[in-house]
Image (cartoon, rainbow, N blue to C red):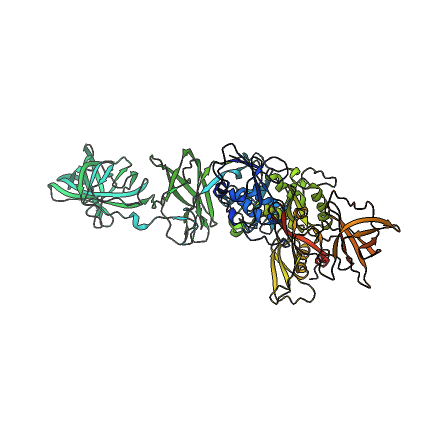
Amino acid sequence: MTIKVYPSLMPGEPMETHTWEGTLAGWLETNGIDYTAQETQPISVTVNGQALPLDQWATQNLAPLDLVEIRPLPHGGIFKGLANIIGGLFNAVFGWLFPRGGGDDTGTPEQGRQLGAAEGKANRAKLGEVVPELAGRFRRYPDYLTPPRRHFVNRREQWLEFLACVGPGQYQILDDEVKVGDTPFSSLGADGEYQIFEPGADLSGVSMHEHWHTVAEVGGTSSGTAGLELSTEVGNRVNADPTSYSFSGLQVDRTSGAFPPAWGALTLVTIEYPRSYAITTQSEVIGGSLTSISEFEGYFGHLDVTPSSKIAMGPRGAAVEYTIHSAVAVGAGVYKVRLTTFSGEPPTEVPVLLPPSPSQTLMFGSPVLRTIGMMADTSMTLQGPLTFETATVSGATIVFAGGRVYGEWTSEFVACPGNEISTAFEVDVFFPGGLAYINEDGSLSGRSIDIEIQYRDIAGGARTTMQRSYSDNTLDQIGVTERINISAMNAAFRVRRVSAEGTETNVRDTAHWYGLKSRLRTRTSYPNWTTMSTKLRSGGRLAAQSENQINIVATRILPTLLPDGTWSAPQPTRDISAFLRYIDHSIGYTDANLDMEELQRLQAIWASRGETMDHVFDLTTVKEAMNVTLGAGMAELTVSDGLIRPVRDDVRTQFEHSYSPQNMTGSLRRTFRARRHDDPDGVEVEYTDDETWTQQTVVCALPGSQRLKLEKVKLQGVTDRTRAWRIGMRRARINRYRNWEYQFDAEMDALNSEYLSYVPLFDGIPGYGQSALLERIEAVGGGAMLHVSEPLKWEAGQSHVVAYRRPDGTLAGPWPAAPGIDDYSVIADVPQPWPVVTLKMEPPHVYFGTAERWAFPALITDIKPQGMESASVTATNYDVRVYADDDNFPSD
């Protein structure tokens, strides 16, 4: 079957169309609707043009070609009931259209999900959430469209920049109403700038549109440092020698263990190891005389044996330094070396003479420092030219001698979230104490450090190493942002220091890995949103807690309703009617869905009274948004003949339809609610003040109130104290003066009335007004004599009035009345045309009574259809005192 849903009983196009197989009850249940919980069904259902009785909703299987039409029953119980059942099914497309029940409270929504106001006090990202809608003039903390990006533009300036969403549509934003906290941007001078972009603007040339993902694992630590500390531990430089090393040319391998982690390329070491030498005694002229001297023959290729250079012999710590007297190469790295020493005063050269030996193990050392070229955990390659013979040697020593010192690698951090990839990365390095050497006289000398950055593709591949050097002579904090452009990948980064960290108090070279960022794909245009780019100099120029306090006061730009019923070009506006129309159009409706005549009438009232709509909506429904919008003008949302119709509770002078025993199907039931000791004796209204943009309260109480118990009302859409007070006083007066409830049953003519219709009610109780049928009317003495079906009771000393009901159900009159020729007649100055009495229609109803008590003036609050032939009506008493403070001002 095909199910078509219509907005009203009137002819027109369906709002939704669905297909279904089975029963209507099954379709409702599938959509989460328990229609059995409704006492009275707020919809009518037809199948192929014939009504489908309620008892067949769950039993009749509908044929594939059946056409099911669902239409809402107008008025009455739809104030609540239809909104509940249809709202669950059609959400903001259908269910919201039906008016609230009971609605005197323009501040606090009825039960259900609370209307959410986007009154946040900081900029934030709202991933997966709705974009707030600004109505009128209100303060906004724009929501991040790109994450805040911190980067150093030079060593002393760190800037914060981001792109944010002001909201859908266009806005007027004045320069002095764009602020950081409470400070206008204009006061920041060169330390801050912003730019507003209209919807659809090209942002490709604006750096703030770039999405830089900041890796949370890199940055401030719980120990209080600004970043991950890049240090070198002294203990990491000490080498524990294994039992033996393997030497071969420039290569040195450990037979066990690993070299210290602080060693690497450009680290300086000294290497000494014992080996076998042949010692012979030779003759040599020294100091002008022939003397004996030892000649050492063996491998010296790893030592500097240039004549006159120094060489040590003996174990480390007990070695004796000698001078190379002569060295003669006899093979690759093999030399015959003679040594001398100096003694006496003045020093005299003395030959070194040891007992001859064909093979004696000796350890020679040299002040020559060896530079590491490449490093691995268990091996190193040295820089030349001195080389080692190929041998595995026990007792060798390799000692740290300075040069470059490598810190420990930080943990490795993935730069992109999820499966994202990037071609641009940033590594931030921070020097919290500056970079300098403090001389004894207090002056500064330069200090340098090196760091090493490694990255790799987490999908696989070798690491790539980058080195950076930094030099300065300042005690000011400095920072550097290193941009790294590579081929697209999701890279993992790690960093380490590769220069020794100063341990003296006069050295300032502490370094931190301050940040890691990756640039992700992003948009270059936002077709429907106004956006804002922001750039702030942070660091020591702005408090950190203010960096997410960027706020604006914006005024929505919308077409406004003109006196002739047309709409202007878009312009800054706070008009209630303008935003109501915007909501209407935002769900695909048009002006044809609005009661434009009533909206135009109310717009004139709102404009004359200065009543505006100022609010920011977050997650809400269309119905709630419309009620908040209209509530700012003391009005509510209803639907009349399929049109969205605002209803304002206001002073009334003209009755609409009338109800008496003549068209009631039962008696009028009146209920008086007496005040109790625990009833509120005042109202406290909370609203957002448009000067401070903070929540303020105003107490509203009638004269004589002790203000012991106040009803709390959270008012939305109103931002000035006077209007908040007036709405609160209206509420307080309703509590005081609306204490009668009327209930009656009537036939279908009750559906002529609408929510808050101003009607006269009649009852047969003695002392109150009477009702009768008009039998005939005739001219008499310039007036009219009405002959009625019931005897009229006149009260001595009282003024009386008479009125009648027109064929359309509305009231004509009342007019001053005088007795007629008998108890069944009354004379009044009834204007032409007079009512017609004919058998073709129901006779007119006549109403009679004293001028003060001839009718019960009432406002309709609820109409519940009872099937298709009758309705149950609820009303409250009308009292003009409710509106007495509508034009007054608060005294405090």
* Residue 347 position in % (x across, y down): 24, 47
View extreme (right): residue: 781
**Of the pair 480 and 178, the residue shown nearer to us:** 178
Q: Is residue 255 left or right of residue 734?
A: left
Residue 403, image x and y in percent?
A: 33, 43
Q: Is residue 288 visible?
A: no
- Against 711, residue 804 (above or below) is above
Taking the image as shown, residue 80 lies to the left or right of residue 261, namely: right
Residue 552 in the image, given as x and y percentages of width and height? 60, 47
Q: Is residue 25 visible?
A: yes
Q: Quadrant of residue 282?
A: top left
Residue 508 left/right relative to 248 = right
Across and down, in percent, residue 72 comes to 59, 43
Which residue is at the front of the view, 621 or 281? 621
How many numbered callouts?
0
- Tell which of 830 and 325 is nearer to you: 830
The correct choice, above or below, for 8 with respect to 77 in the image is above
Q: Quadrant of the C terminus?
A: bottom right
